[in-house]
Image (cartoon, coloured by chain):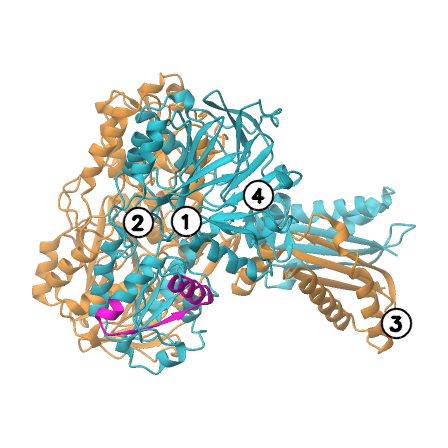
Chain colours: A cyan, B orange
């Protein structure tokens, strides 16, 4: 098992007949999945997703893969294969198509419907190619074969990529529920056929590689939801991901059993469930669906609200209900709220805040810590071993995971018989060549986090985020002094103002004479350069605040010459 | 079950013969536990802890209970009863004793040893009274009886408080492991005796009230740790809470089985385990303990490091190891790291970051998601029902919990037969009177979060934290303009500087003429007041940045007159 390769240089040209694999996202963090395959001068991209920021990226809206390594080669891109419709796999497509709109998108019907809806909001009409499990498509030199995989969204696909360099299987996200709601199981038999043919490289989902065992079938959630409905005497509000069609189906089924109508709340819930119904993926009994207005006129025991906001997003439908800011729904005693969803790491504080606010308002809140109202969409260790044993890959590259997941997956590979030196443990930007049946890291290209913040893309970098963290922790103290441009003598000030430091403006009284004295001394020493004078001010204010308060606000000195 | 009472006024005088209970912390958030009991003009305090800040309190070190409601009555305080030695129960003692040093501290031997060590660092030598389970003490009008309870720290106590107003039982933190490592079980038989006598009010730990069932015995962790040691071929590093003596004992036992020496790392681990050993609570076989220097000279398969840092604290021993900054220990392939600890809500991002950094460096990291290396210290629903059924309280006041926990506990009370109107669901600052056997909320006193930030206590308030959040999310843009004090004409500037906004200073070029134009217009309109001019600048810069970037940095205008 290899170690980090960040210190490597970009690789030389790809050897004739070799396949190059460059993950631009998804390795080292869960999200922004994007892998570039290169053969014979042509490129194939698998997935193009976003990563959601955490507390380490304050103020950031989204994180994109770094397209820089392929920007001058977009003409070589044969297609973007999208394995399924989750944001961490499709969310960056609009940003890549902004560079070149006519790159074809390849995916299943539901996946393409979701990405088209997203692109329509930006008035982009993409070139698409719909594929199905069992199908094959030649995309330039890449002979692709698609396989059904079971995940927490319908219509997910794995893709096998054949080139003269060998056979590569990329699982996308998957699990192996053996009794899925739609009967569409992960095509283990198909993978076995590939295994018999000989898989040279397996790229496989690592998200749950640390977790022992097997995932509980999705259909076991149904009876739990039904028993919650059974006890509920008032309104029921269920929150889940807006793409989790099977979870929503089970809520609809429970509503039917208990003679309740259903109203969808939240823009993405309404939109996606409309798409799912149109494609025959969601069965809604006639007369069950009501509008929000109709719903609010029904007796409480006759209604279910199916809502977004399961991750504690303050602006979501559930978030607004929790703070009393929803236009139609005011939470009260007797309400039952179910968070039938995972808790994405990093969202804990927001989710528990929403749960507490709902509880405070009187609702009974049921979430995954309390009852079995969620199962994961990713294969844990037990299922990954099934896959490894059936595929018997010559080389294994764990993808989709933080380091803890990638390492655990590599360990499973070793335990199941993959030679340790054939397990390529990579992070974003590592370049892997598959040559003569052997995969190895040959270099590294820069693959920084590209931040979307408001309308700016890539304008916010790491040093800015450091500034934000300092400001967020300690606020700032700004000092302004006006000096004579010739003599350096103080003409006005110093004045101090601060934000995030103290509510009492008089705390700065002691430092004013210290600043004046330091500037006088500097003037006496002949220092007149405003930049140098700013350093003088920064130093004395920083020293004072450390001694007096043991704190480190940002010191922002401004010296203006007149 | 009652609803929030924040809108109530402070209550009138306590009726003759009544007992007043005021929780100053611990209800509505987990932490800063502190409850004040009043009878006949005298006060008794139970616990005095801190709350650790989360992302909503950026830059804050600690959160204290608000002592304001009792500050002018400290002379009436008979004692502070400390139920056990965790920071959320003892951490604020030094801050309260800073107001009056001679308030006696009452607690078990281990609890007082921990609090004395903490006070010694501030050169405070407290008055103490050591009590044991089964013991009784008269503290002014409060006749206290102490009961053993089992928790994740040794020597924890519950306290029954008898006054002419009735019998109150305060459990402190507890669970009911029936086979604890030290054989010291929660005294359910003693609680049954109280129940037979008649408990007028039960205050009981709500932390795990949402969780169904029973806690796994602590001793089941031992074999799991032992099996991890069994597989480990190199060094083993175990992190846990520095007060979890029984967890550490099981690590020592596993080390003994596998012929490994143990070194303690981290100031609080070394200090607390020294105290625990001296008091006979921790058994360390002769020759097992080695210094850090000795440890680094032993073969990797012969050593266990027992460390702090299980909550991802960047400055802790484990935190430093994860970033390669520990002076003695560099993580490498072959190392096994075990986080034998809970994951306190709010710490997820930090903990997973440490796990990923350790994994990246090559370690195999085992944590509670992956193996049974932790059990909670708090009674879940099944155990709480045992307590409720044995104590049969007339009135129930759920304590120690966020709203979701308090509500769940109230529901358990109702299910076990407490009359719904005798369940007082309170938050911090609510005032409850027990009069004629009936507990009811009679008012509310202010109980704000008191923030410790550096040397300042209470100087940082909610509006400052809002400023920090704005700065942390968007940075700021500062503009400085020098104007003539008579004409209002611009003499120098505008100059713009920003932090946390953009790495490209030229982004501000377009707004400079807009500011100048706005100031000229203001001057033409006869506006010369610097404050009004600042508002002009704030408005135009804010509008520009919103239109051009869809962002909301803080706008900090300074207009200096010369």
Nearer to us: label 3 or label 4: 4
Q: What percent of the width, then of the height, locates residue B34? A: 33, 60
**Proximity of marks 2 and 4: CB atoms separated by less than 8 Å:** no
- Specify the quadrant that holds the N terminus of chain A: top left
Residue B96: quarter of image = bottom left
Q: What percent of the width, then of the height, locates residue A283? A: 31, 64
Q: Which mark is residue A184?
A: 2
Label 3: which secondary element: loop
Nearer to us: label 1 or label 2: 2
Subunit of mark 4?
A: A
Q: What percent of the width, then of the height, locates residue B528? A: 82, 73
Say which residue label 3 marks.
B486
> Residues in magenta?
A254-278
Crowding near the residue tagged with mark 1, few <14, some 14–19, many ≥20 C-alpha atoms within 10 Å: few
Residue A396: quarter of image = top left
Subunit of mark 1?
A: A
Magenta segment includes B516: no
Q: Which mark is residue A345?
A: 1
Crowding near the residue tagged with mark 2, few <14, some 14–19, many ≥20 C-alpha atoms within 10 Å: some
**Proximity of marks 3 and 1: CB atoms separated by less than 8 Å:** no
Q: CA distance from mark 2 to mark 3?
A: 80 Å
Q: CA distance from mark 3 to mark 4?
A: 51 Å
Instruction: State the residue lying farthest toward the bottom.
Output: A297
């Amino acid at each position: 098992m290899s170690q980090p390769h960040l210190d490597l240089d970009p690789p030389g040209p790809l050897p004739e007949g070799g396949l190059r694999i460059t993950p631009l996202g998804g390795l080292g963090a869960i999200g922004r999945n994007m892998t570039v395959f290169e053969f014979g001068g042509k490129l194939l991209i698998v997935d193009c997703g976003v990563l959601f920021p955490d507390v380490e990226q304050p103020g950031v809206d989204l994180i994109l893969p770094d397209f820089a390594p392929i920007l001058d080669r977009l003409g070589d891109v044969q297609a973007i294969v999208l394995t399924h419709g989750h944001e961490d796999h499709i969310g960056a497509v609009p940003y890549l198509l902004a560079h070149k709109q006519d790159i074809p998108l390849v995916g299943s019907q539901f996946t393409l419907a979701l990405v088209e809806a997203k692109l329509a909001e930006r008035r982009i009409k993409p070139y698409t190619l719909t594929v199905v499990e069992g199908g094959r498509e030649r995309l330039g030199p890449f002979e692709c074969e698609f396989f059904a995989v079971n995940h927490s969204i319908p219509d997910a696909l794995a893709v096998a990529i054949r080139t003269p360099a060998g056979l590569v299987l990329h699982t996308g996200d998957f699990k192996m529920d053996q009794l899925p709601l739609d009967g569409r199981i992960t095509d283990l038999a198909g993978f076995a056929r590939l295994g018999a043919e000989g898989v040279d490289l397996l790229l496989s989902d690592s998200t749950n590689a640390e977790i022992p065992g097997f995932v509980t079938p999705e259909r076991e959630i149904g009876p739990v939801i039904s028993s919650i409905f059974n006890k509920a005497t008032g309104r029921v509000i269920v929150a889940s991901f807006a793409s989790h069609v099977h979870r929503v189906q089970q809520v609809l089924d429970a509503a039917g059993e208990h003679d309740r109508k259903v109203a969808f709340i939240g823009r993405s819930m309404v939109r996606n469930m409309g798409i799912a119904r149109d494609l025959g993926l969601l069965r809604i009994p006639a007369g069950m669906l009501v509008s929000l207005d109709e719903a609010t006129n029904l007796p409480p025991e006759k209604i279910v609200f199916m809502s977004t906001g399961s991750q504690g997003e303050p602006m979501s439908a559930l978030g607004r209900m929790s703070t009393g800011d929803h236009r139609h729904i005011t939470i009260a005693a007797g309400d039952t709220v179910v968070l039938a969803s995972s808790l994405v790491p990093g969202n804990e504080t927001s989710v528990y805040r929403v749960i507490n606010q709902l509880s405070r308002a009187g609702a009974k809140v049921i979430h995954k810590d309390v009852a079995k109202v969620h199962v994961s969409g990713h294969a844990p260790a037990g299922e990954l071993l099934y896959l490894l044993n059936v595929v018997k890959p010559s080389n294994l590259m764990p993808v989709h995971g933080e380091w803890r997941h990638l390492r655990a997956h590599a360990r499973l590979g070793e335990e199941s018989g993959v030679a340790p030196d054939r397990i390529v443990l990579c992070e974003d930007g590592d370049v892997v060549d598959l040559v003569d049946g052997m995969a190895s890291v040959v270099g590294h290209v820069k693959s920084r986090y590209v931040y979307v913040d408001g309308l700016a893309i890539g304008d916010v970098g790491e040093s800015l985020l450091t500034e934000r963290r300092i400001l967020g922790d300690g606020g700032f103290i700004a000092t302004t002094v006006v000096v004579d441009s010739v003599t350096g003598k103080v003409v006005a000030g110093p004045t101090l103002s601060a934000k995030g430091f103290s509510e009492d403006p008089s705390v700065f009284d002691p430092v004013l004479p210290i600043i004046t004295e330091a500037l006088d001394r500097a003037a006496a020493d002949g220092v007149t350069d405003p930049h140098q004078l700013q350093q003088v001010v920064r130093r004395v204010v920083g020293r004072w605040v450390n001694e007096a308060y043991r704190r480190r606000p940002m010191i922002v000195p401004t010296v203006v010459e007149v």
